[in-house]
C-alpha cells in the first residue's frame, strides 16, 4: 500500500495549478524554439536552463520536461 500512497502523493504534487502552468509554459517555449531548424530538444533545454534557476526544484523539473517534449513535438 505504500506504493499507492507515494504514487498518489506524486500525482497530487504534479497536478497542482502552479505546476500545470509551468508545464504549459515549458511546452509553449519548447515548441517555439523546437521549430527552428537545427535546434533539437537538448539544445533547447541548454538554452532555456537559466530560466529555471529561480524556480522551486519540482517546478523546474516539470518545466524542463515540458520544454523537452515541446521541442520534440516542434521539431517533428
Image: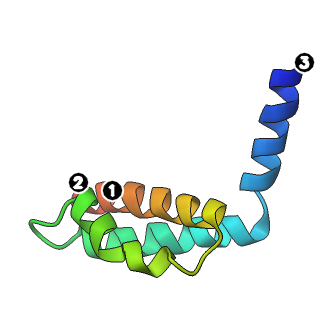
Which mark lies nearer to you, 3 or 2?
A: 3
Residue in view at x 46 percent, y 66 percent: 27
Residue closest to the far top: 1
> Which quadrant of the rendered structure holds the C terminus?
bottom left
Disc 2/disc 1 C-alpha distance (Å) = 5 Å
Disc 3/disc 2 C-alpha distance (Å) = 41 Å
Q: How many marks?
A: 3
Secondary element at tag 3: loop
- Which percent across, then down, holds residue 33? 28, 74
Other residues around mark 2 within 10 Å, as few (<14) / some (14–19) / many (≥20) = few
Secondary element at tag 1: helix
- Which percent across, then down, holds residue 21? 65, 72
| Residue on which the image places disc 1 | 73
In the rendered view, tell whether residue 14 sits above or below residue 10.
below
CB under 8 Å between callouts 2 and 1? yes
In the rendered view, tell whether residue 50 sits above or below residue 64.
below
> Which quadrant of the rendered structure holds the N terminus?
top right
Disc 3/disc 1 C-alpha distance (Å) = 36 Å
Earlier in the chain: of badge 3 and badge 1, it is: 3
Q: Is residue 6 left or right of residue 51?
A: right
Which mark lies nearer to you, 3 or 1?
A: 3
On residue 76, the disc is 2
Residue in view at x 47 percent, y 56 percent: 65
| Residue on which the image places disc 3 | 1
Residue in view at x 32 percent, y 62 percent: 71
Q: Is residue 21 left or right of residue 18?
A: left
Which one is nearer the viewer's eye here, 22 or 57? 57
In the rendered view, tell whether residue 55 sits above or below residue 27.
below
CB under 8 Å between callouts 3 and 1? no
Q: Quadrant of residue 39?
A: bottom left
Q: Is residue 11 left or right of residue 5?
A: left
- Which percent across, then down, holds residue 41? 27, 58
Amino acid at each position: 500500500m505504500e506504493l499507492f500512497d507515494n504514487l498518489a502523493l506524486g500525482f497530487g504534487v504534479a497536478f497542482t495549478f502552479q505546476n500545470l502552468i509551468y508545464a504549459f509554459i515549458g511546452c509553449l517555449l519548447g515548441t517555439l524554439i523546437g521549430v527552428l531548424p537545427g535546434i533539437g530538444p537538448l539544445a533547447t533545454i541548454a538554452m532555456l536552463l537559466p530560466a529555471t534557476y529561480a524556480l522551486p526544484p519540482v517546478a523546474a523539473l516539470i518545466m524542463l520536461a515540458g520544454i523537452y517534449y515541446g521541442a520534440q513535438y516542434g521539431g517533428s
